[in-house]
Image: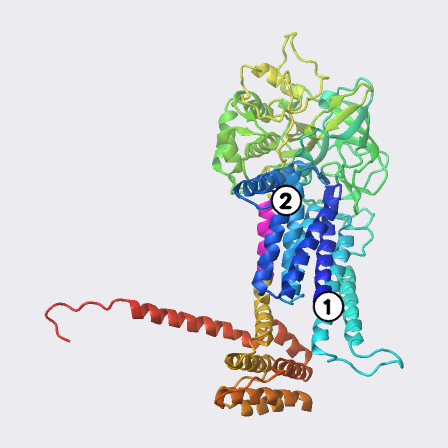
Amino acid sequence: MSGRVRLALCAWAATLMSACALLPLVRPTTWILQAALLLAVQSGVGAATRRVPLARPLTVAAQALVALFLLTVTFAREQAVAGLVPGPDAFVHFADLLRQGSDDIARYAIPAPLESDGIRLMLVGGVLIIGLAVDALAVTFRSAAPAGLPLLALYSVAAGLSDGGTDWLWFLVAAAGYLLMLLAEGRERLSQWGRLFGGAARVPGEESGTVAPVRTGRRIGAVALGVALVVPLALPAMNGGLLDGTGAGVGSGRGGGGTISAVNPLVSLRDSLNVDEDRQVLSLRPEADTDISNLYLRIVSLDDFDGTTWKPAKRSITAVPRGGFPTPIGLGPDVKRTEIETTITAADWYAQDWLPMPYPPSGVRIGGNWRYEPEGMTLVGDHGQNTRGVTYEVKSLDVQPTAEQLASAPAPPPALTREFTDLPDSLPPVVAATARKVTGNATNPYEQAVALQDYFAVTGGFEYDTQVQVGSGSEAIARFLKDKQGFCVHFSFAMAAMARSLGIPARVAVGFAPGSPQADGSVAVGLKDAHAWPELYFEGVGWTRFEPTPSRGTVPSYTVPDTSSGTLPDPSQPSESASTAPSAAPSASQACTPQQRKLDGCASQSPQAAVAGNDDGPRWYVLLAWVLGGLAALAIPMAPMLWRLRTRAVRLGGHGRGEADVAVTTLAVWQELTDTAWDVGIEPDESQTPRTAAARIVRLGRLDPAAAASVHRVADAVEQVLYAPRPRPTTGLAQDVRRAVVGLRSTVSGSTRLRAVVAPRSAIRVVWTLSEWWAGLVARVAAVRPSPRKPSGQES
């Protein structure tokens, strides 16, 4: 097997090994076999065209064309001409599949089903594109080192979408493939240059020569992997390396200290919410006679508002209290409450870092590594702990304040008011103005809160629509108030911000609305029960739930005026799943009267769009743009090195062998020799003859006799081309230059060699070439520009 074929096989293997990082994202994983087969065909075409041989750009074009045919046969056979040639219909079908794939990525939780042809096209097509880039760089253009960039991009996209549990394993697999490719390229180059590094065997009978670089390559690979694995463990600023067995958890150890700086939980819920089928997330078994209409499961509270979105503030976490939780902040002894106990079982696929619990919890029994955040009375997994398949028991308080208690609540503590009424300066003035207008007739904070709730849920003409895209940024709430379309995230965000503008402490809670009762007495909570709602603080009662979202959840009884009507709905009925279609009527429609809507007498819906400040997750083209931007950011510093590698390959590559080609070949070889000497610090002197320049390179480069002889042979060939009437071809000039290059690099320091590769001085010729081209262009434009006509009557 030739070295080039071996390198192509290693590039194919490296691409597949990096693609393995995508395996946890989709089930089943059979797509990798299809991708491996199509990638093998693409690589085989490249190997065949290189043996012809075709020009390098034509080789890449042939591989790209074959990849397009393969994707057409696989995904668009019915739309193709003769089932093979892609036509306009096939490209339209590809666009539809990509659009479908991007929608499915937003809808499905990880792992997504492979039944989606859009996702399968994105996976297989992405692997083919990365494989083409790797094969072109490593094999066609013989630059294996830059081929690591597309491999890194493939691994980075997969690692960014996965839950991080096995990222270290896929990193090792991808790194092994990359090192394998580098080693194959080194052996292939060595086979062309001869045993340049060979020496005497260290042990009698041991083979010398090419074994040394192979052994060195293995040592370099082992050291590189060791550095990547071990160094992060020694740096206090990092959260552990790949050998950190505890994972990148939260908190510091298992003691009573530590902090949690959580990401926005809306992002972690987004994938789970955007599904077509209502998969069950949790199974609840509450005590008998429990009113499940108020059994909201709260995951975490969002109390930090930066003008763009709400997110959890950085809080201290402690060990889970034993013997019960403390009384919730602000809850006085005069408020009626009932303690209930609920057994909760999470689905074996639902991995949430926060523990869903009814609020306020008074105690919890659960195994595993969990920490307690006192401010929000929440539990968060420590060092990789999550809810996957967990069963736990929660004791919670069903707090039942009256309207009179809320209306007569005293002012909250100043510190709490300052923290939970903070608003950014970027918030549009229309938010506060609307809040003042809506609550103009209210006489206390409780009446203001009820007025805000009624404005969104009943009187304001808002529509519940899961497909609306309100957007993000400081104008998001203002746009929502203008368009009056959105779902629970937008309603809760807007009401909390407006309450803060009125001086009422407010935050947003994220979790699940009450689920659906089952025949066995349990309550099933599905993905479509995911919900967000505002919590407002009243001294003597504490954090109090409100429900501004139309047709979602249940309206709290303490916000409903007393009525003698006998037509009230049964409060024990849970919320129903949402329809996939957006609501066509405003919140005050004839189909559902304002009083029925306020008292939860209408069918409940649940969000199917992403629960995030900007509604949708990052689209595939956004991820692609980031990947391409990252590649460009890496490629710009590497441009001089890539240019020199390409230039060297062209100068020392195959040329014509006729007499007409002697001058071009010889001068190109001489240019490469002088540029290499320049890269290691020997600046060229254009005033010297080739023979004098060669002697100068030998002297300053301290070359050994063999390398010096090679330099002088190249100089003699250049003089013959310049001065002989009929120059004759000189064989072996490329090998002479390679021998001289090795000699020049062997006599300089390691830093000089590194600079010669990464930042070669001779790359300045690109700037000179561009400058000459621009000057010539300006001269040609000036030559064809018509001269100004002289006024009549003037003589020259």
In the rendered structure, which amino acid carries the disc numbered 1?
Ser
Q: How many marks?
A: 2
Q: Quadrant of the C terminus?
A: bottom left
According to the picture, the residue beneath numbered tag 2 turns out to be 73
Mark 1 vs mark 2: which is more N-terminal? 1
**Horizontal side of residue 309 vs 765, given as left or right:** right
Question: Where residue 285 sits in the image (x, y, percent)?
Answer: 82, 24
Q: In the displayed structure, would residue 252 be above or below residue 756?
A: above
Q: Which residue is mark 1?
A: 2
Query: In the depicted view, which residue is nearer to us: 661 or 488?
Result: 661
Out of 59 and 26, give the one closest to the viewer: 59
Residue at the location (61% across, 49% down)? 69
**Per the image, is 166 magenta?**
no
Tell me if residue 418 comes above or below residue 690 in the rendering: above
Q: Is the residue 310 above or below the residue 555 in the image?
A: below
User: Mark 2 is on which residue type?
Assistant: Val
Residue 115 horizontal/vertical position (percent): 70, 37
Task: Please check the rendered image and state whether residue 627 is part of the magenta-colored stretch, yes or no.
Answer: yes
Residue at 70 percent of width and 14 percent of height? 570
Which residue range is magenta in the image?
A: 620-634
Q: Residue at x 75, y 79 (%)?
A: 195
Q: Main secondary structure of the magenta part?
A: helix
The N terminus sits in image quarter: bottom right
In-front residue for pair 249/54: 54
* Residue 433 visible to an observer of this rendering: yes
Q: Secondary structure at mark 1?
A: loop
Query: Looking at the rendering, which quadrant does residue 64 occupy?
Result: bottom right
**Mark identifier at residue 659:** none
